[in-house]
Image (cartoon, rainbow, N blue to C red):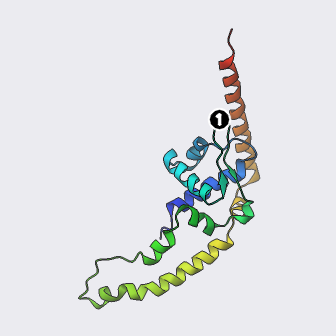
Amino acid sequence: MKLSFKLSVGIHILLVIRLFQDHTEISGKLLSLSTGCNPVVVRGIVRCLKNAGIVSVPRGPGSSTRLLKDANEINLWEILEAVDPEAMEKMVTGIHTGSSQVCPVGRNIYGVLKEPYGKIAGVMENEMRKTTLADLAENFSEEELEAARAELRRRSLSKAIAKDDAEVSF
């Protein structure tokens, strides 16, 4: 069962912000490279997260996307509601159509599956509300994060030096 592409990309984006916002500028380009998604997709999801009050997205050069809440206060259900509010409803009502009305199974399949699918959706919602961004962030090794942060700092420094060199005129 596929829950939501937008949810997994939204979580990915928020984890990058959470894990690196204090170490480097979080740009759309960085988020696009990390997620492997088209920048248009990333901008759309970031816009949804901004509209939900989860992130801030300042404008202008050198601006950096940041979390507006502590990672302990952001749960998976809130992220899903922000980026794909119809996802759970689609799952619950996503029973195939076009069944034969002559066949008793085809004629009744929606009624047979509606209740159990609704219960499953309720369990999923409860679990998603319990799982926070901070919980997910704990799954990354500190050594790996530090190596990535050092590389990001090195690249930022290189970019700043290159920019300064470009602005020097003789």
Callout 1: 10 Å neighbours few (<14), some, many (20+)? few
The image position of residue 90, as x and y in percent, is: 45, 72
Instruction: Please give the count of numbered marks on the rendered protein.
Output: 1
Quadrant in the picture for residue 48: bottom right
Identify which residue is drawn at 61% across, 53% down. Answer: 13
Res. 38 in view = no
User: Which amino acid type is marked by label 1?
Assistant: Pro
Compare residues 142 and 72 and report the one nearer the observer: 72
Q: Residue furthest top?
A: 170
The image position of residue 31, as x and y in percent, is: 59, 46
Judge left or right: residue 107 versus residue 8: left
| Residue occupied by mark 1 | 61
Identify which residue is drawn at 67% across, 29% down. Answer: 159
Identify which residue is drawn at 70% across, 34% down. Answer: 156
Q: Residue furthest bottom?
A: 104
The image position of residue 27, as x and y in percent, is: 62, 42
Q: Secondary structure at mark 1?
A: loop
Identify which residue is drawn at 38% across, 84% down. Answer: 110
Res. 137 in view = yes
Q: Quadrant of the C terminus?
A: top right
The image position of residue 89, as x and y in percent, is: 48, 74
Judge left or right: residue 7 versus residue 91: right
Quadrant in the picture for residue 15: bottom right
Q: Residue furthest left?
A: 102
